[in-house]
Amino acid sequence: MPPQIGIGSTPTSPPLPSKIFFTVKSPPPSAAPLLPAHLPRSSTQPGAAHTAAAARDREEAMAKAKPSSSAAAKSAAAASAPPATVHSALVTYSSMLALLSLCPPFVILLWYTMVHADGSVVKTYEHLREHGVVEGLKAIWPMPTVVAWKIIFGFGLFEAVLQLLLPGKRFEGPISPSGNVPVYKANGLQAYAVTLITYLGLWWFGIFNPAIVYDHLGEILSALVFGSFLFCIFLYIKGHVAPSSSDSGSSGNVIIDFYWGMELYPRIGKYFDIKVFTNCRFGMMSWAVLAVTYCIKQYETNGKVADSMLVNTALMLIYITKFFWWESGYWCTMDIAHDRAGFYICWGCLVWVPSIYTSPGMYLVNHPVNLGPQLALSILLAGILCIYINYDCDRQRQEFRRTNGKCSVWGKAPSKIVASYQTTKGETKTSLLLTSGWWGLSRHFHYVPEILSAFFWTVPALFSHFLPYFYVIFLTILLFDRAKRDDDRCSSKYGKYWKMYCNKVPYRVIPGIY
């Protein structure tokens, strides 16, 4: 499963439209559904979370059933009810305001510490204490330059063109709460290959030196901080005046609408999906490009690449390759099928991913570590094993769903719970909950190898400084919170069957511990 991109925690919302966080409003005449709900949908791909199964079940129900007037009335009444949240209102509002105000300067502080303060949090703290927080931050905050804007727009335009023009199979995502089925063109792996080949080709033939990106990295991140904030304002306005589908709505609160987003599937025109661009083609692609950039910068500076940098870069690229291999599966996860396009998701992908997710490599540029062949190979193999287990978890679940439970899990018939639930149309449906294999160890075991993968591409930096490990800590907190939100949604959907599932698989993430 890919990194669960975004900052903070979203409101919990069971898979029934009557409980969604936003008040769904009717689309204007021009805002037609992305795809009629009665058309068939492709099978769920590896990496889809429990929300993907819920979405698939909703699709089947909406495709076959006509709503009764009483069910429709109940849904309409419930839709106007106050939203339910995982955390208290005070915690939710406080976290939103804190993240809106603190994340932008943190990105700059992390870059400054990694590049200009030798990776030492103490040095950065002393600078801020000597000059004051405000003046000290102003002194180290680089202003966006023309070069930075050219690099950003050049990269963004290149990825947008690839997203639109490269061939790819048609993929239909899970049905939305309003009955729409988003249609995608699955060409992420092709775009990934073209991007890396082009980037390395430009360097190899002397057309463009990637070291320039590193040299202007502070200005680029500063431009992304401001530019992405303006982009989120655009999304907020678009959600009000020109939503792409009926899956849009307002909570009535400007801050909440800006932070969580207005639209579930915003598009420009008919084919350009904004969340696919921000999350996959800009965010994830920039992660790969910057990983290569740091490697090249170290080579340009030292005349060689340390084995620590090679291990870090190799593991990141293997992980990102795995992501684009099953990118269509990501379109069925919470980031796409549940979280709306706002600051939480879009700013996080446009700014947080290029800065925070790449930070171990950013540190290693000026701090090469010679691990030695044995240690380097051991870390590399352990990281690859974790990435494979993470992939196999998703593959196992996808195969179980594809065969309706008639498959082999670890050499024997899978253990499962047949859970029934009621759709918004009043029909009783059933789902299969896998309780064996990886999914018998814990309900979200796939998060364990994902966190360990991040640890193994960070540990080549060793332990001289704490900051390179910030991403691992951040990812751990994020995924544990995500596991709780996913459990809350499934509990609301399956009721007593979810309790049976939890009794059979008692641990949420770490077997035997949590």
Image (tube, rainbow, N blue to C red):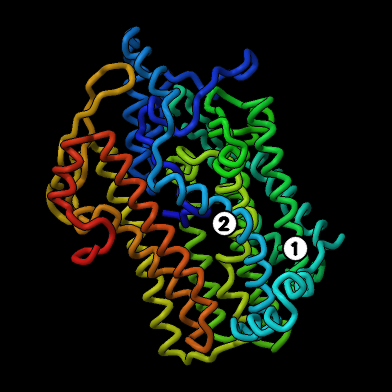
Label drawn at residue 496: none
Label drawn at residue 98: 2
* Upstream in sequence: badge 2 or badge 1: 2
Q: Quadrant of residue 48?
A: top left
The amino acid on which the numbered mark 2 sits, given as a three-letter code, is Ala
- For the C terminus, the image quarter is bottom left
Query: Residue 177, percent across and down?
Result: 43, 27
Q: Quadrant of residue 214?
A: bottom right
Instruction: Say left or right for 440 vs 188.
Output: left
Residue at the outermost right position: 146
Query: Residue 432, percent across and down?
Result: 21, 37
Q: Nearer the viewer, residue 257 or 159?
A: 257
* 7 relative to 313, above or below: above
* 21 relative to 156, above or below: above
Q: Nearer the viewer, residue 85 or 214?
A: 85
Q: Residue at x 81, y 71 (%)?
A: 206
Q: Is residue 109 visible?
A: yes
Instruction: Say left or right for 382 vs 472.
Output: left
The residue where tag 1 is placed is 220
Query: Residue 146, percent across and down?
Result: 87, 60
Q: Residue at x 41, y 17 (%)?
A: 76
SS state under label 2: helix
Instruction: Say left or right for 384 vs 238.
Output: left
Q: Quadrant of residue 215?
A: bottom right
Residue at the outermost top position: 69
Q: Nearer the viewer, residue 91 or 438?
A: 91
Q: Residues within 10 Å of mark 2 (few under 14, many from 20)?
A: few
The amino acid on which the numbered mark 1 sits, given as a three-letter code, is Ile
| Distance Cα–Cα, label 2 vs label 1 | 23 Å
